[in-house]
Amino acid sequence: MTGAGLNSAIVGLGLTEMGKVYGRSSTSLAAEAVRLAVADAGLGLGDLDGLLVSAGVKQDVNVNLAAVLGLHDLAVLNQVNAYGATAGVMVAQAAQAIAAGAATTVACVFADTPLKQKQSAGAAWGSGAKRPGAARNLRGMAGWSVNSGATNPNILYALCARRHMERYGTTSEQLAEIAVAQRAWAVQNPLAQMREPLTVADHQASRWIADPLHLLDCCLVSNGAVAVVVTAADRAASLARPPVHVWGFGQAHAPRRMHAGSDWGLVTPAGRSGPAAMRMAGIGVDDVDVAELYDCYTYTVLVTLEDYGFCAKGEGGAFVSDGRLAPGGKLACNTGGGQLSSYYMWGFTPLSEAVIQARGDGGARQAPRNDVVLVSGNGGILEHHSTLVLSPHERKAS
């Protein structure tokens, strides 16, 4: 459905409290986020005829959210999961449903509550593969992962980063530049969990998580929920908030192949998803004013910039250096602090900040230009990717 995004816009954004939010279920947070997004658009719940739901680590939000919200006359209802790529996939599905006449107003929501009191953030990502006897029925690479101890994303992303370092000479200090730049944006974001200024030396002094990744290379763990409302562009103009138009979208998937000679960890599906979205939008990377990139790790930002074409493969380390991504730099990137410093809501972290920037609501952290906002989502171990191109301006079909 090429061009379907030309007739849709995000008109509502709902953000709950983020971070160490205890005593609430994911479902209650999801319901709050939807209500906030609908109100933000100047609509009522009864105006919704579509609901797309996504759950994170806890996996305890599902289509029953419709009943919780009292939505008993929906035309579109689905639970969507492409891991961190889900937000972009959901907005694309909402735009396609609207273009096809299957729905008029679709809410997309993500909620998660992995943090528990008196437990470490890392406990939220504990692997069931560590249980005694868990490896008994695993074969091939799955068995290797358990027996080698490579049972969580930290270790696998570390392998990817190490491959890039050995192939292209990328350094830990260059990864640190990404964390430092995003923290500089977060300092100006009242919603961010981490707002203390950060230096490269601070990054280098932080404890190892999995060599070559330090603690400050890794994203936060957060409780909370985010929702957006999508409707037709012609209807959006009459609603309460400035519309954020969907110019283009794309997705690509490549389950990892960990064998000799593969390019796993060096080349990602972003290399197909990004160009597809930009072709639909009729833009190139030089047109991008703001990039809101999925940043589960600093390395994810670096390799996505390469695969989107902001720089050549292997040149990501040099590209992110010298404050290029920081406030005042050449590319406004992850302007809310991203998942490294702001909050971790899977792909709804970059999506929510993209809406804020496109509306001009960034306050002290508002990017100087916001005509074209690029949004990425990454899932699995660099296996699933979605891309959105958003703008405060309606794009006229050529």
Image (cartoon, helix red, strand yellow):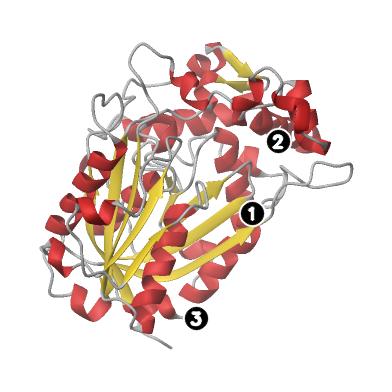
Estimate the spatial distance between the alpha carbons at disc 1 and disc 3, rounded to whole Å. 24 Å
The crowding category of the residue bearing disc 3, from other C-alpha atoms within 10 Å (few below 14, some 14 to 19, many at least 20), is: few
Q: Position of residue 38 (x, y in %)?
A: 17, 58
Answer left or right for 109 relative to 248.
left
Disc 2 marks a residue whose amino acid type is: Cys
Which one is nearer the viewer's eye here, 351 or 27? 27
Disc 1 marks a residue whose amino acid type is: Asp
Answer left or right for 269 relative to 295.
right
Give the number of the mark in front: 2 or 3: 3
**Circles 2 and 3: CB atoms closer than 8 Å:** no
Disc 3 marks a residue whose amino acid type is: Met
- Which of the marked residues, 2 or 1, is nearer the chain's N terminus? 2
- Which of the marked residues, 1 or 3, is nearer the chain's N terminus? 3
Q: Position of residue 242 (x, y in %)?
A: 19, 64
Give the number of the mark in front: 1 or 3: 3
Q: Dot 2 corresponds to which residue?
A: 160
- Determine which quarter of the picture holds residue 271: bottom right
Q: Dot 3 corresponds to which residue?
A: 1
SS of the residue under disc 3: loop
Q: Dot 1 corresponds to which residue?
A: 307
Q: Is residue 83 above or below residue 46?
A: above
**Residue at (26% x, 56% y) in the render:** 66
The crowding category of the residue bearing disc 2, from other C-alpha atoms within 10 Å (few below 14, some 14 to 19, many at least 20), is: many
Give the number of the mark in front: 2 or 1: 2
**Residue at (60% x, 14% y) in the render:** 208
- Which of the marked residues, 2 or 3, is nearer the chain's N terminus? 3
Which one is nearer the viewer's eye here, 373 or 138? 138
